[in-house]
Amino acid sequence: MKETLIARLQEGNLRWQQRQDEQTAMRRKTAAEGQQPYAIVIACSDSRVIPEQLFDAGLGELFVIRVAGNVLDRHQLGSIEYAAGHLHCRLILMLGHTGCGAVGAALDRGGDGFIQYITDEILLAVGEEKDPLLACEKNVRHGVEILRREFREHPEIPTEKLEIRGAVYDIASGEVRWLED
């Protein structure tokens, strides 16, 4: 079983390498010159949420950080600090989505083992909210608040040069709905 799955990944990578299109030129360009993403997107690990596709972005355009429930810890904050400080990204987007399993698990008070680290963080954000969509929005807003607070306290990255926003992706319609502050 494992060999079959690894073979599937290997075959997919070979197909991807062999495509002779604009992606090939962009791969070579970013390999030689480095990446220059214009935005940082913190998104859920859900396989239906692919920021590069949602925003029709190519290689090197987005700096994507994916973690279940789009929660933040020091590892994600360090990655964001790198992208903002060294790659000069000026937009940070906290992107939640409908049908999020991590938010659902938090609402069900589930999550044993390592998953509890994620559900506990989501519960801090959503409080007693029971509606999955409203809980998702609260989780996104919570992440935006954390980002704004953390980067206000870090003078290495002037916050006046950063825009931090939140949005929710609808997995059924494909629409990204931007949340107001």
Image: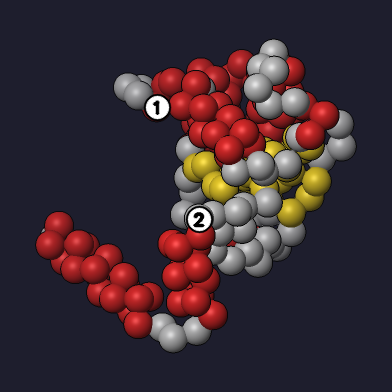
The x, y position of residue 153, in whole percent, is: 69, 13
The x, y position of residue 149, in whole percent, is: 72, 17
Residue denoted by label 1: 115
Among the two numbered marks 2 and 1 on one chain, the one whose residue lies closer to the N terminus: 2
Quarter occupied by the C terminus: top right
Crowding around mark 2 (Cα neighbors within 10 Å: few <14, some 14 to 19, many 20+) is few
Which image quadrant for residue 89?
top right
Q: Which residue is at 27% across, 65% downward? A: 9
Q: Which mark is residue 165?
A: none
Left or right position of 71 against 97:
left
Q: Which residue is at 76% across, 34% downward? A: 162
Q: Which residue is at 63% across, 64% downward? A: 57
Q: Which mark is residue 34?
A: 2
The x, y position of residue 40, in whole percent, is: 63, 44
* Residue at the limit of the structure toward the bottom, as seen here: 20
For residue 86, say whether it is visible. Answer: yes
Mark 2 secondary-structure assignment: loop
As rendered, which of 116 and 160 lies closer to the eye?
160
The x, y position of residue 64, in whole percent, is: 55, 47
Q: Is residue 6 above or below residue 141?
A: below
Left or right position of 154 against 74:
right
Mark 1 secondary-structure assignment: helix
Q: Name the kind of residue labelled 1 in the image.
A: Ile
As rendered, which of 140 and 110 lies closer to the eye?
140
Q: Name the kind of residue labelled 2 in the image.
A: Gly
